[in-house]
Image (cartoon, rainbow, N blue to C red):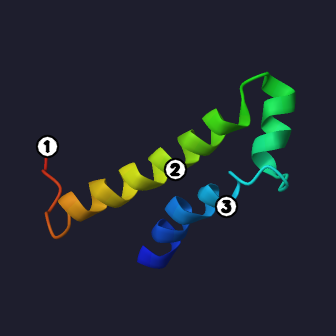
Amino acid sequence: GIFVLLQAIRSPLHLLHPELSGDSQTLAGLTLIPSIVWIGIWFFWGLFALLYLWRHQGTEPQKI
């Protein structure tokens, strides 16, 4: 699982190369939001998930 989270952070950075086209280019064409914004969203969601899980490791959920 940790490998998938690390790839979720690293993979969007490969889309920063202008000669590569991918999902960020497609979403930019469909939504008029620049591809760099989509790359940033993917990067920060992956980073957030990693930090959230790291911070809450081994803690039991509170029972209501």
Looking at the image, which is closer to me, 37 or 59?
37
Residue 1 in sight from this viewpoint = no
User: Residue 60 location, x and y as percent?
Assistant: 14, 62
User: Count of labels shown?
Assistant: 3
Mark 1, secondary structure of its residue: loop
- Mark 3: which amino acid? His
Question: Marks 2 and 1, how far apart in space?
Answer: 33 Å
Horizontal relation, residue 59 to residue 25: left or right: left
Horizontal relation, residue 63 to residue 36: left or right: left
Quick one: quadrant of the N terminus? bottom left
Q: Which is in the foreground here, disc 2 or disc 1? A: 2
**What residue is at 41 percent from the left and 75 percent from the top?**
2
Which is nearer the N-term, disc 2 or disc 1? 2
Which is nearer the N-term, disc 1 or disc 3? 3
The residue where tag 2 is placed is 43
Give the label on residue 64, or none: 1
Question: Marks 3 and 2, how far apart in space?
Answer: 11 Å
- Mark 2: which amino acid? Phe
User: Residue 8 location, x and y as percent?
Assistant: 54, 62
> Label 2 neighbourhood size at 10 Å, few (<14), some (14-19), many (20+)?
some
User: Residue 37 location, x and y as percent?
Assistant: 62, 33
The residue where tag 3 is placed is 14
Which is nearer the N-term, disc 3 or disc 2? 3
Whether residue 3 is situated above or below residue 12 in the rendered picture:
below
Q: Which is in the foreground here, disc 1 or disc 3? A: 3
**What residue is at 60 percent from the left and 57 percent from the top?**
13
